[in-house]
Image (cartoon, rainbow, N blue to C red):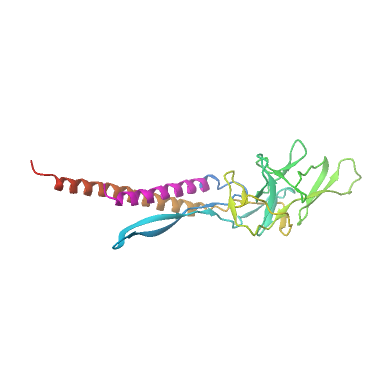
Amino acid sequence: MDRSIYTALNSMNILRDNQSVTAQNLANISVVGYQKDVSINFSSVYLDRDKGIDPRVMALQQAGGYDSTPGPMQQTGAPLDLAIDGGGYFIVKPAGGVLAMSRRGDFTVSADGTLKDGTGTQALNVNLEVINVPAHRTITVSGDGIIKIEPLNAPLGQKVVVGQLATTFGSEVPLAKTIDGFVRPIDGTVPAPDNTTVLLSGFIEGSNVKSVDELVSGIDQSRAYEINVKFVTTAKEIDEATASLMRMPQ
């Protein structure tokens, strides 16, 4: 079999992975605070030979990542809907228990009195502890994440601070999306809260996925995949024709 077939198969494997990334992005286009995954980048390398350069070029893949560009803001007016103005992340505790970073800000007070986002992930305070919110008449969150309530049994107008949301602008260590969809530094740690981010109460951040871009990317990937399939078929036909020429006449 001609070795060029393996070159095409290598490209097809990368294209298949990129199609999965595109499908993942389209599936999360309406998810609050979702940051889209970036497709694997192609690069090329010539195969070395003792007497020169091999005319065949292998496709290499460079790891993708995620797009940290803020998504569009939607005004809701709900006091616990929080959006990060610019860069930064909430520090949260997912169900698995490993601390992580997230831009999802559709918070509510759950039945057990803790502050959680729409996925049930717990928000943490500056001491990296779960935030408990007592029964209250009103609740507000300031730009620096301080949560104040008007307790049910307190005089009207009396405010009580129940905590400050832990936020961080990022980390000196490069960030990456982990398999659970949260963002963490590549060394597995989570940076200490710095609360340098600005929060907007009454807003939520939408997904930064652009449907048109993803659909166009999906079409391009499908066409490239089909070209490689045709290339494999052509190489097979050439290989069979060459083999027939090499047969001894009967």
| Residue at far front of view | 50
Residue 99 falls left or right of residue 56: right
Q: Position of residue 109 (x, y in %)?
A: 75, 41
Residue 133 in which image quadrant: top right
Residue 222 falls left or right of residue 247: right
Residue at (78% x, 55% y) in the render: 142
Q: Nearer the viewer, residue 88 or 135?
A: 88
Residue 89 falls left or right of residue 65: right
Q: Nearer the viewer, residue 43 or 68?
A: 43
Residue range in magenta is: 1-25
Residue 46 falls left or right of residue 117: left
| Residue at far top of view | 111
Tell me the chief SS of the magenta region.
helix
Q: Quadrant of the C terminus?
A: top left
Residue at (18% x, 46% y) in the render: 243
| Residue at far left of view | 250
Q: Position of residue 210 (x, y in %)?
A: 53, 53
What is the number of callouts on the image? 0
Question: Is residue 121 within the magenta segment?
Answer: no
Q: Position of residue 113 (x, y in %)?
A: 78, 39
